[in-house]
Image: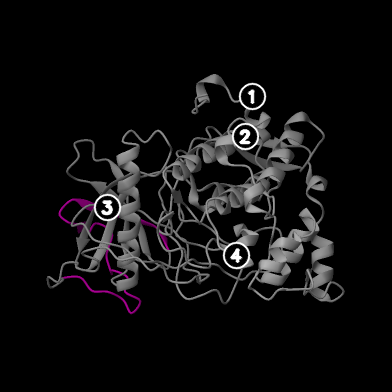
Amino acid sequence: MVAAATTATAADKETKETSKTETTTQNGNGVEQPPVVEEATSTRVERRRPRRRRSLNEDESAPTEPAEPAEPRRRTRRGAGLLCKEKSPYRDDSDGHLIYAFGDVLKDRYRIARTLGEGTFGKVTECTDMQDLCQTRVAVKIVKNVTKYREAAMLEINVLKKLEENDPNGRHLCIRLLSWFDFFGHACLVFDLLGKSVFDFLKENDFAPYPIEHVRHIAYQLVYSVAFLHANQLTHTDLKPENILLVKSSYTTFYNPRRKKEERMLDRTDIRLIDFGSATFDHEHHSSVVSTRHYRAPEVILDLGWAQPCDVWSIGCILFELYTGFTLFQTHEDREHLAMMERVLGHVPYRMTRASRAGLFRHGRLDFDHHGVEGRFVRENCRPLHRYLRDETVDSRNLLDLMQRMLEFEPEERTTLKVALHHPFFASIPPESVLHSG
């Protein structure tokens, strides 16, 4: 089993876009503090199918990658940044990371066993809980001793506490915050130790697509979990494969004669949703740029404002990725991104182009050189959504229909997740795996 939980997003308005992001988070115990914002990470990569970005997880220490910035979240809550000023026997490095050694003990309780990963926010460690008779292993996220990252950690803590109030038994598959505490200026957040992210498993399996039954079960759980957020007036804003962790990532190896190579198949596909550092309640300030680039909805790019439907769009992109093994919109730039969307889904509705304040359209048409190098790349690497079907089975057809409903340009026309739970693609979920009622 492995660890993780990520926290992402928010900082200066959108600028350098790059390919997939890496962010990772875990949570902890202690003095209550308020939040603000963290940064979304995203890293430019070549436009090849094997994707570059990874989440922090099992047997892997991931490098820090630059983040894709977004406008700061304007929230304040009492107590932000009032962490302990006691003189520390520990030192921080130049970036604000805590310098520690394996075997060090945090708060006289959590003995550090290994580093699970590193992100812009800090590091995630696997620790042994020495106050537990069973010596339980947990994941402890040690946040940088930097004000904006402490505040972002407080933001995630407050969101997770609110979710726990509404779901004390964790039925809705969100990561559980076990405790949190201050450690000489470092917010430390304690989580259950989980498995790899669905992205990491995909990457380590050489980007072989998930079996359709696994796509179905992961998709169903994801829709169910995010529908719970939406019912509680909360938008996640950073849904992506890196932020979906497998509870256990054990697998069986088999030979795939079609690909002429060995592949891995998960033993179980139970998941947990992580990274609530950029989650936003309906009544709170909505920053103009949200979501990691590849999963960003068109209304965000067009600066039309956003709400819960932006999560639905992200889920549509995730389902495509699990089904095909590669990213639907592999890009780093707004115009190219919209050109890809139009190639896959048809033209952006005129109402949206006219209302947009982003200056990307002229007379209702995308201002993009379709005949240049970028245009040729879009033509060669994108095609209409239905042409990505692996086969003509009922399952593939139903999945295509579900993705099309999630990838409607108009937010108001996108399916809601409450409705999506009853889609025919989920009709064959085994009775013991059904989570919703009605």
Say whether residue 268 is left or right of residue 375: left
Mark 2 and mark 3: span between their CA atoms? 32 Å
Secondary structure at numbered mark 4: loop
Q: Which residue is mark 1?
A: 428
Q: Which residue is mark 3?
A: 28
Q: Residue at x 19, y 36 (%)?
A: 133
Q: Does residue 47 appear anywhere in the picture?
A: no
Asked whether disc 2 touches disc 1, contact meaning CB atoms under 8 Å apart, the reply is yes
Q: Residue furthest bottom?
A: 94
Classify 378 as above or below 387. below
Mark toward the viewer: 3 or 1: 1
The x, y position of residue 360, in whole percent, is 71, 74
The x, y position of residue 283, in whole percent, is 40, 56
Secondary structure at numbered mark 2: helix
Mark 4 and mark 3: span between their CA atoms? 36 Å
Q: Which residue is mark 4?
A: 304
The magenta-colored residue range is: 89-118
Secondary structure at numbered mark 3: loop
